[in-house]
Image (spheres, rainbow, N blue to C red):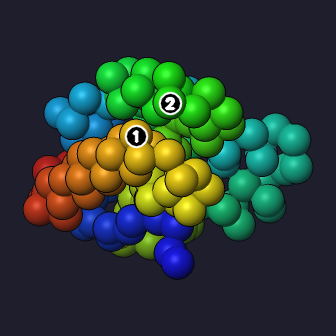
Amino acid sequence: MSYTHTVTVPLSWEDAVQRTREALGEQGFGILTEIDVRSTFETKLGTEAADAVGDYVILGACNPTLASRALAAEPALGALLPCNVIVRRGKDALETTVEAIDPQTMVQLSENPVVREVADDADARLRKALAGLSEAKDISG
């Protein structure tokens, strides 16, 4: 089973991050956390390690309504939240890749029917956000 949904877009790094945030927002997700992997690697491991990973950010996306339903049904699911969305671009890449966790992975770990409903809803919303990104055109110049 694949554990992410992926789209590659012809957007600059900055544009892809901004549009990913907007697309998630349109689907009811807020960004709770942001990890700049490149910056962290550069600080902790040096420029060579940062260059190897390229531009790479992990956005911790959360839809409060869905999260509250999931946690009410199964409190331990908090270990799987928020839904991580990765925006990454290699050093010499002309396109940017956006990957979102497949919420169906939660269903693999729980037999609770409410968790299935939440995962189905989150999955539809994340797929819609990615689909909107795949239609985007680079406006950065």
In percent of the image, x 56 and y 62: which residue is there?
108
Q: Secondary structure at mark 1?
A: helix
Residue 12 image-quadrant placement: bottom left
Relative vertical location of residue 128 with respect to residue 35 in this rendering, above or below: below
- Residue 72 image point, x, y percent: 50, 23
In percent of the image, x 21 and y 36: which residue is there?
27
Query: Is residue 77 among the parts visible in the rendering?
Result: yes
Circle on res. 114: 1
In percent of the image, x 24 and y 53: which residue is there?
124
- Residue 11 image point, x, y percent: 27, 58
Relative vertical location of residue 36 with respect to residue 16 in this rendering, above or below: above
- 41 to the left or right of 137: right
- Residue 58 image point, x, y percent: 55, 44
Query: Is residue 22 among the parts visible in the rendering?
Result: no
* Residue of label 2: 73
Disc 2 residue crowd, few under 14, some 14–19, many 20+, Cα 10 Å: some
Residue type at mark 2? Ala
